[in-house]
Image: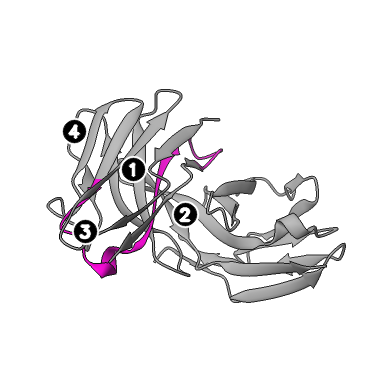
Amino acid sequence: SAVISQKPSRDICQRGTSLTIQCQVDSQVTMMFWYRQQPGQSLTLIATANQGSEATYESGFVIDKFPISRPNLTFSTLTVSNMSPEDSSIYLCSVDLGQLYGYTFGSGTRLTVV
Amino acid sequence: AQTVTQSQPEMSVQEAETVTLSCTYDTSENNYYLFWYKQPPSRQMILVIRQEAYKQQNATENRFSVNFQKAAKSFSLKISDSQLGDTAMYFCAFIINAGNNRKLIWGLGTSLAVNP
């Protein structure tokens, strides 16, 4: 399995500002994923990040709002830009360990925008 | 369409008793993998149990077991001897291949409360 360190664990931000969330994996992985989980809801995939290429965004998510970096095989960042209260959610990163093992997740970032 | 349905938004069980969480799914693929994840209040997403669709034998993991009915596309989770630490959201999911990416398809979750 893989261990993912995600930070910050929580933050309270002013509207209009940006927050960058970091995920560090203890092993090299090809694909990393960023999810949003709104209060009381299931997970929604924001984008898939492969090292060396641009992230692939899901419908409803755009790069200008959620820019992603993937500089190497163990690290990725997600920025939530120009935040509004509607961006208040838990954001989770995960890595794909293959079909048999599913995904491993970071501990999540609880974002509150005021 | 690839979907996962968890028909029980909330459930409760007394400590030490057994509870079953239901999950049905829809896919046209024949080979896939099914998962149950647990998300306690700490919000850490934890893999509870997994099942390969090509295996008829139901997966078990200590107090957790599944009842996998492939023809019915059903994948329920049974928790035996429930403990207070089992209180969490439980999500059913399966992996599909979507082009060059694999994707997890998620259910909406079941909130389980274990009462002392």
The span from disc 2 to disc 4 (Cα, nearest Å) is 29 Å
Disc 1 vs disc 3: Cβ atoms closer than 8 Å?
no
Residue placed most toward the observer, B15 or A11: A11
Q: Are the residues under badges 3 and 4 in a single subunit?
A: yes
Give the Cα separation between the discs numbered 1 and 4: 14 Å
Check the residue under mark 2 and report the chain it is in.
B
Residue placed most toward the observer, A3 or A59: A3
Of all chains, the one bearing label 1 is: B
Question: Given the image, on which type of amino acid does mark 2 rest?
Answer: Glu
> Quick one: SS at disc 3?
loop
Which class describes the residues within 10 Å of circle 3: few (<14), some (14-19), or many (20+)? Answer: some
Residue A100 lies in the magenta stretch: yes
Residue count near mark 2 (Cα–Cα under 10 Å), binned few <14, some 14–19, many ≥20: few
Specify the amino acid type for callout 3.
Phe
- Residue A50 lies, in percent from the top left, at 27, 34
Residue nearest the observer in this picture, A22 or A75: A22
Q: In the image, is residue A6 above or below residue B14?
A: above
For the residues labelled 2 and 1, the Cα–Cα distance comes to 15 Å
Which residue is disc 4 drawn over? Answer: A53
SS class, disc 1: strand
Give the Cα distance between marks 1 and 3.
Answer: 17 Å
Locate residue A69 relative to residue B75 in the image: left or right: left
If you read the primary sequence from the N terminus, does the residue marked by circle 2 or circle 1 appear first?
Answer: 2
- How far, Cα to Cα, is label 3 from label 4? 17 Å
Residue at left 60%, top 56%? B40
State the image coordinates of residue A3 (x, y, percent, origin top left).
51, 31
Circle 2 sits on which residue?
A: B29
